[in-house]
Image: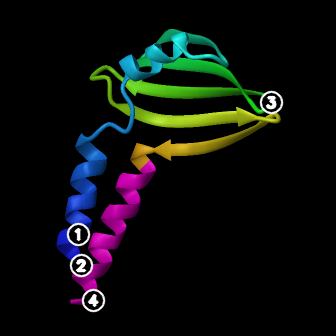
Amino acid sequence: MIETLRKILWETTYLNPVTPNELFSLKNDEGYLDVLKKTTMRGFEIVVNFYDDDDFVTTYYTFDEDEKVQLIQMDEFGEITVIFDRQQQIKHVLRKINECKVSS
């Protein structure tokens, strides 16, 4: 169990579920309105606007300076949903690893 959690921790820390180039390539896809890049204090954000079954959706991808996505949020119907939060995922896996160590 702990080895599986360590593998998940490694993947969460070092792998990227989406890259900036993948998002920029959406500009050419039908239904995508814009893909915009905004510089932030610790990296940059890519904002993707598109239609999903006639519903307008905005997705925010927050990247660090190493181009690793840290946070993905979707704004649909005026409600923001967190799709991916790297820091929360790391905390969750570390908590599970600590629970395994304590119960051993």
What's under tag 2, amino acid-wise?
A: Met
Q: Which residues are magenta?
A: 88-104
What's under tag 1, amino acid-wise?
A: Thr
Q: Assess whether mark 1 and mark 2 are in contact (beta carbons under 8 angstroms).
A: yes
Residue at numbered disc 4: 103
Q: Is residue 94 above or below residue 89?
A: below
Q: Quadrant of residue 32?
A: top right
Labelled disc at residue 1: 2
Residue at numbered disc 1: 4
Query: x, y (%) of residue 56?
Result: 77, 25
Q: Assess whether mark 4 and mark 1 are in contact (beta carbons under 8 angstroms).
A: no
The Cα–Cα distance between marks 2 and 1, rounded to whole angstroms, is 5 Å
Image quadrant holding the N terminus, namely: bottom left
How packed is label 4: few (under 14 Cα within 10 Å), some, or many (20 or more)? few
The earlier-in-sequence mark between 2 and 3 is 2
Q: Nearer the viewer, residue 19 or 64?
A: 19
Q: State left or right for residue 52 relative to residue 93.
A: right
Q: Nearest to the eye among marks 2 and 4: give it.
A: 2
Q: State left or right for residue 12 relative to residue 53.
A: left
Q: Provide the secondary structure element on which disc 4 rests.
A: helix
